[in-house]
Amino acid sequence: MTLPLSTLLQHYTHVLFSTGCTVPVLHSALPPSAYCVPALSLVHWYTQHPSRPPTPSLEKISHVTLIGQGNVSLDVARMLLTPPSELAKYDVPDPVLAVLERSAVEHVSIVGRRGPFQAAFTTKELREMMNLSNASMVPLDSSILQPADGAELTRQQSRTLQLLQKGSKNKPGTTRKSWSLDFFRSPTGLALPNATDAVGVRPPVQLTLAHTMLDPSARAVTTGETSSLETSLVVTSLGHRAEPSAAWYDPALGHLRTLGGRVLDAAGPTARNVYASGWAATGARGVLVSTMMDAYAVADTILRDAFPGEDVKTVPVGDVDVGAKTAEADKEYTDVLPQAVVGEDPPPEVEKAWRDGQVTDYADWREINAEEIRRGHERGKERERMGWDEAQRFLVPR
């Protein structure tokens, strides 16, 4: 369902964008193909996202290369390397488990252009990888784990260093599956095979990697040396940006233009009573806790704007108390919303889409949630997630 924003705005006096960053950032040297996909496609597949991404042919893939060393990369690697019997205890859907049961993946390479002290993954995600029951990490060269002279490590960097020095729970070479952190490598091209897939066989591709080092400002620069990595599938995990067609999107930022949670026009004035929170406002950065804190703070800002002079406690985000910027941010504004609306009915287009089963309201979500938990308990797991098509069938007739 596509609904023009102009149609939506005339029905509400306040609007909050909490739409996240849903467009994956692609690598200029790695155009999407059957051999190169964004990590978001895999994540949406194993979480049964309504976008219905294609099911990966894991039974034909033995080696996966992830480009990027953030938490998403480690999460994808963990899903590919964890025995399905262990995942079955959680909320991984049965259709996903069936594909993972047939998987031929034996090694996952996780490639990053900088070193271990600049990697974006958190200690928690790295520890989970180290503790995989059926996979082992390829040992790192000890020289990579040496901090620069005079460098003072943060608490997280120190913990990361300790984990990398200790290595995985399983000793290298003792497991059928393995994984590696390939630091100081940056992709420059992908040579696709000439042959087509044979039954049960996927021809490998050659990934060209430039070797890198850090300059004095800790930026990755090439050394002039290159190498080639043979792999079955390349998965890019380089961050996300907001939908470029969204109103108030700033291409230079990759998300909506905001100040203290308030949405700004391109010329600078605040769009009165229009707000954004989370990644839609800040870009794809931070973990769940920081996003939650931002949401609380923007809620306080909305209350301050609606009830000026009232005692509304704000929740600081970093060093900025967004709720305290009311007077400053409202010096200039543009009106894009009505001062008042008649009735509380949603736009007719939304009501029709709801009747047609294209829109899920809160009551529907509660029914789906309860049913997923019930089905999960029958299977001895947290829940059994429904795909979008299955959820629609469950809700019909309304």
Image (cartoon, grey):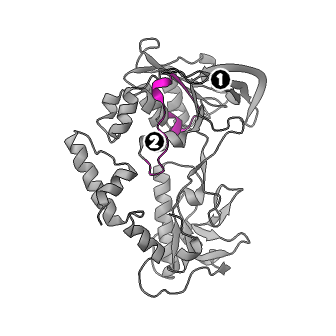
Q: What residue is at 48 percent from the left and 86 percent from the top?
A: 341
Q: Which of 55 and 261 is in front in this view?
A: 55
Image quarter (top left, top right, bottom left or bottom right) of the C terminus: bottom left
Q: To which residue does mark 2 refer?
A: 45
Q: Position of residue 82 (x, y in %)?
A: 39, 28
The mark total stands at 2
Examine the rendering and report whether any part of residue 246 can be seen. yes
Q: Could you say which disc has been placed on residue 193 in the image?
A: 1
Q: What element carries label 1?
A: loop
Q: Residue 125: image x %, image y %?
A: 46, 35
Cα separation between marks 1 and 2: 25 Å
| Quadrant of residue 25 within the rendered picture | top right
Mark earlier in primary sequence (1, 2): 2
The kind of residue on which mark 2 rests is Trp
Residue 254 x %, y %: 65, 55
Point out residue 79 in the picture as x, y percentages from the top left corner.
43, 33
Q: What stretch is highlighted in magenta?
A: 49-74
